[in-house]
Image (cartoon, rainbow, N blue to C red):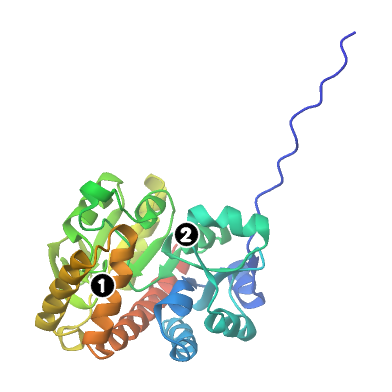
Amino acid sequence: MQPSRPGPPAVPPAPVPVLSSEVADALTAGRPVVALESTLLAHGLPRPDNRAAADEVEAAVRAGGAVPATIAVLDGVPHVGLTAEQVDRVCADPDLAKLAVRDLPVALALGRSGATTVSSTALLAAAAGIGVFATGGLGGVHREAADTFDESADLTTLSRTPLLVVCAGVKSILDVPATLERLESLSVTVVGYRTTTFPGFYVADSGSTVDWAVSSPEEAAAVLAARRGLAPGGVVLANPLPDDEQLDPELHDRVIADALAAAARAGVRGKAVTPFVLDHLHRVSEGATLAVNVRLVLRNAELAGRIAAALALLPR
């Protein structure tokens, strides 16, 4: 009789996000919830302004009629909805890692902490059963990507994640037309909010357009519901700033051109280009870009709250 061979080692179950009591109660009761990323707080805004912004963004979601769920990984545990003390930690720790989807397994396995990007926030939000996510701008295809192959994981993650993300387009330092082409190739549904003009984050008009627009939170919620019924994947809702709240377009274009030229002279390439250009933009604009950044996130958070509230009223 052949001795029995040991089977393969048992695979531990994937970690389940820990929900805050408020988020857990809301989801159980079918009340609206909006996911929020934590990278904006840890890496996108300066300290201590980031802590005040964290409260303002959550308040904007509540003003829209939903419960905010800021997401982060703390000591290897993904948290969906943070306590005030946990938000303090995210905003104060200068060594907090930046976690995209590819980084989550390492952080979870080794007990590390990190702020979640658009891609990892979307993944964890969907795992928790949250259908709406608010952020500032998506990542996308970088300029010179034909040589560097530099493309954000946000795009592929959204192609297989069943949620709607409210954003101000993609950062205009990226290749916006190429990003929209990739979203089309990945079958991600892209619609504008009351416009077919695709925004460029700091500016209302990136120079590109989209084919579809919705005119209300109810229509946006209906699009997500229809998408869920058809195929896996997400919906991008582009919500541009009003013209009188955007960064001066002439200043924006001039500073980006100067920053790209400076990066080329300095030999900055690949992933280092984006932070180099953003830092240049922040310095030359004397902080105006940071004010615009907060403004657009607040608008997106409130609109996301209204969409989540509309989604909660639809039959399941």
Instruction: Name the residue type under label 2.
Output: Ala
| 135 in relation to 267, above or below | below
Where disc 2 sits, the SS reads loop
Q: Which residue is drawn at 18% across and 68% down?
A: 260
Q: Residue at x 60, y 59 (%)?
A: 107
Residue in front for this viewpoint, 25 or 237: 237
User: Circle 2: is it few (<14), some (14-19), or many (20+) Cα within 10 Å?
Assistant: many
| 49 in relation to 12, above or below | below
Please say whether residue 108 is visible from this viewpoint.
Answer: yes
The residue identified by callout 1 is 277
Q: Where is residue 2 in the image (x, y as percent from the top left)?
A: 87, 10
Residue in front for this viewpoint, 261 or 308: 261
- Which part of the image, by quadrant, shows the N terminus? top right
Residue 100 marker: 2
Q: Tell me: 140 left or right of 11.
A: left
Which residue appears farthest toward the top when viewing the image? 1
The answer for how far apart the CA atoms under marks 1 and 2 are is 21 Å
Which residue appears farthest toward the front when viewing the image? 266
Residue in front for this viewpoint, 217 or 155: 155
Mark 1 and mark 2 residues within 8 Å of each other at the beta carbon: no
